[in-house]
Image (cartoon, rainbow, N blue to C red):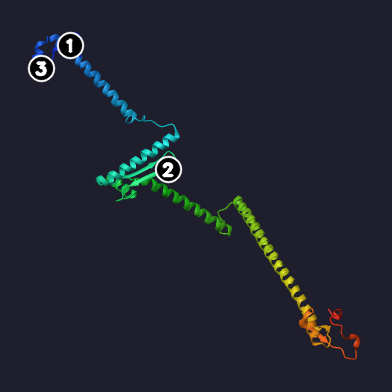
Amino acid sequence: MIGPRLPILAHYHPTSTLPRFIELLSPLLIQTIKSRLHCYTYTLTTAKEKKRSKQLQMGRGKIEIKKIENTTSRQVTYSKRRSGILKKARELTVLCDAQISIIMFSNTNKHYEYCSPSTDIKSMYDRYQQVTQTDLWSTQYEKMQNTLRQLKQVNDDLRKQIRQRTGAELEGLDMDKLRDLETDLDQSLTTVRNRKFSYIQTQTDTYKKKVKSSQEQYNTLTHNLVALEMKEEHPIYGYVDNNPSNYESALAMANGGAHMYGYRVLPSQPNLHEMGFGLHDLRLA
């Protein structure tokens, strides 16, 4: 509604025809209505544009498109958006039979990648080079060549030092370098000599322990042999009465019964009869 200044608009009905309605209005009134309609349309258009611009800046009206300062929120948002991108890539691969390769790096330098099952990342890079006529590997190849040259130079220097330590290629060395080489050789010789002495000392200690153990075993065996020979040369004797049962009992109870020999007394020695086992003190040790 325009307001009370245009009362004739209140009598306008949608069923009325536009030409008839225009005939009823004066030219000045028509100009006023057009001006008001233009202002109203401009206001609506401006409001819509501002709203649309704000929505674009806010990212669908959810969050403002700018760096998230909170570390936890940033990581959560990255995880969600990453999953969404990978999901869309898989769907696009299946629906449109497209070949897609995605490589993402987070701010913590953790990488994620996706490649269509029908290809691989290297093939995608090669294809990209062919289509765009660009070379992605020239810089890397030059770095590899420089690294190879440096390693070769280091290898040559080390081989030369080894030959000089054996007394070869000494012609190009001045007095200072010869003195340094002599010092290095003396230090190396001292290190080798100390290592040799340490090895000899270790071997000597080991042999001494073995000799000591063998000597102890020899002493033990010698002692056992002497004891065995003494038993064989000096058997143990014990008194046994004429009673056979006493003889067997004496043999059974004697210490070292396998080497005990019994002796009997004559009937003319009555003072030695019926002594039983009381003469065990007569045994020879």
Residue placed under numbered mark 3 in the picture: 18
Residue 32 is marked as: 1
Residue at 13% in and 12% down: 11
Does the residue at mark 2 contact the one at mark 1 (Cβ under 8 Å)? no
User: Of 8 and 224, which appears nearest the observer?
Assistant: 8
Residue type at tag 1: Thr
Residue type at tag 3: Leu
Cα distance between the residues tagged 3 and 2: 68 Å
Q: Measured from the top left, where is residue 131 in percent x and y? A: 27, 45
Q: Earlier in the sequence, mark 3 or mark 2?
A: 3
Image quadrant in which the N terminus is located: top left
Does the residue at mark 3 contact the one at mark 1 (Cβ under 8 Å)? no
Q: Nearer the viewer, mark 2 or mark 1?
A: 1
Residue at 42% in and 43% down: 110
Mark 1, secondary structure of its residue? helix
Does the residue at mark 3 contact the one at mark 2 (Cβ under 8 Å)? no
Mark 3, secondary structure of its residue? helix
Residue placed under numbered mark 2 in the picture: 110
Q: Dot 3: few (<14), some (14–19), or many (≥20) neighbours within 10 Å?
A: few
Image quadrant in which the C terminus is located: bottom right
Residue at 14% in and 9% down: 28
Q: Dot 1: few (<14), some (14–19), or many (≥20) neighbours within 10 Å?
A: few
Q: Earlier in the sequence, mark 2 or mark 1?
A: 1
